[in-house]
Image (tube, rainbow, N blue to C red):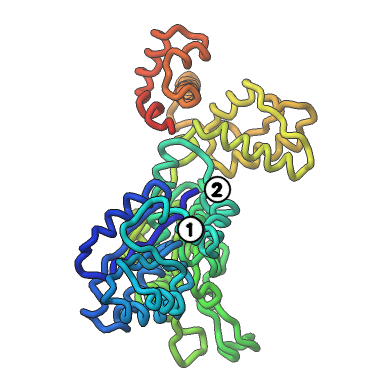
Amino acid sequence: MKPETTLLLECDTVDENGIRAALEGILEPHFSLKVLAQPATPDHRPLPKFVDDLARLLKRSNATLVFLTLLAKSVSQTKTLLESIRKISKLPIVIVADAMQPNDIIALLRAGADDFITLPLQAGDVLPRAWKLVQGSGEWRRARTIRTESGLRRLIGESAALVDQIEKIPQTARCEANVLIMGETGTGKELYARAIHYCSARAGRPFMPVNCGAIPGDLVENELFGHERGAFTSAVTLQTGLVEEANGGTLFLDEIDCLPTFAQVKLLRFLQEKEYRPLGSARMRQADVRVIAASNVNLEEAVEKGTVRQDLFYRLNIISLVLPPLRERLEDIPLLTRHFLEKYSSEMNKKTPDLTPDALQILMAHGWPGNVRELEHAIERAAVLCDGPSIRGSDLILASPSVTRGQSLQEAKATQIARFEKSYIQGLLRSCRGNISKAARLAQKNRRAFWQLIQKHRIDVESFRSSVP
């Protein structure tokens, strides 16, 4: 895994020695390099303003390493700058400079620099120092732990529909904008929200999930914003709200469409001003909270019906993710099934069973109205009931398959077969890395017949070839 971001800052107005280009050429093969800013020299703006700008940059990035470039004439200014940076960040800092006097180097190290590199830049000099600093930093260990223990690790699948949404997560995590996640019940909206939180600079702060549909309407305001002692008859003690508990972190509002109108007004003000008033309080309070909302209904239709305020919808819908239902990513079912089998077999101290072809065919042909959550529960039941080395079709207990309104029995059967057939071919092409002849042999079909199936389902073979590492 590469470091998520390397922050490159140039403190000179003119890069006379081509330092930026040289650093990019050396670091890019080994780091997820992102040039976030090229500030003007601190000589041209007040130092406090420069440090404030830098603090904002560091806050919205996932930086693991900072490079500061300077010329010898900037040593005094850079020493002051380093001392200021150390008050706002503990990230490792490398000074990249022209020829320097030993006294100047020692002064910069004492001011907070972790290492220095002099020109000309050589890969054999830059890379070992950079890796040593990054792997020893708390930010790198935190990022690696986040990816291993939560967030993206739990988003399982390789389908184009899923990958398209996963690829948006790192960029979404780096900004502070509100996020709206749309998707049917069971598609994993809270999982995506957690991934955004744990991939962001807020990962060390609370992630507070709230199901708006589970809170009685008359208690919503109290739950979100809290109350002072004596605010109402039964308020014998002070109670902090979920907004205050999530301060510095992320507030996840699931089923946002269930909020009553008066609570939507209160939430809108908080989103706009980042301030709120607890019940019974005489003063406003502030909280630094990022809001991620989710819904399993079409919010645009809810706005038209008047159940969701239009201004609240616009305020939440700055960045939107639309999660695909499981029926649109059937090729992910084998991966998800294996994951759930290993998970529940481990919990029950049982050997992970295999899945027979007839069981897989049943899973692929099912409509999955409950999406991934329904699949997980089905596999958990099968793992509990299975006594042998394999899960058979008879071990699966599924809800009645969903049928499109107006379909005849024959039409419904044809639809399910077509879905399975397309997903099966895509799985073969993926495992064979786009090699049609090899995939046809595995399917026990001649190459021409297999190619006709590919054309029938409009499958892009090149996409499986281009995905080869």
Circle 2: residue type: Arg
Please provide percent x and percent y for residue 136: 55, 61
Q: Residues within 10 Å of mark 1 (few under 14, many from 20)?
A: many
- In-front residue for pair 246/122: 122
Residue appearing at x 49%, y 63% in the figure:
253
Residue nearer the viewer, 264 or 75: 75
**Relative vertical location of residue 418 with respect to residue 308 in this rendering, above or below:** above
Q: How crowded is the residue under tag 2: few (<14 C-alpha within 10 Å), some, or many (20+)?
A: few
Q: Which residue is mark 1?
A: 199
- In percent of the image, x 64 and y 87: which residue is there? 237
The CA span between labels 2 and 1 is 11 Å
Residue 69 in picture, x, y percent from top left: 31, 67
2 or 1: tag closer to the N-terminus? 2
The residue at the point 32 percent across, 75 percent down is 53
For the point 32% across and 83% down, the residue is 48
Q: Is residue 11 visible?
A: yes
What's under tag 1, amino acid-wise? Cys
Where is residue 342 drawn, in percent x and y?
68, 39
User: Residue 178: image x %, image y %?
Assistant: 39, 64
Give left or right: position of 306 versus 227: left
Q: Is residue 193 left or right of residue 240?
A: left
Residue 308 appearing in the image = no
Judging from the image, what secondary structure is the residue with disc 2 in?
Answer: helix
297 sits left or right of 24 in the view: right
Which residue is tagged 2? Answer: 153
**Which image quadrant is residue 36 in?**
bottom left
In this rendering, is residue 288 above or below 370? below
Question: Which corner quadrant of the image does residue 310 belong to?
Answer: bottom left
Mark 1: which secondary structure?
loop
Is the C terminus in the top left, top right, bottom left or bottom right quadrant? top left
Up-down relation of residue 371 to residue 48 (above or below): above
| 5 lies above or below 261 | above
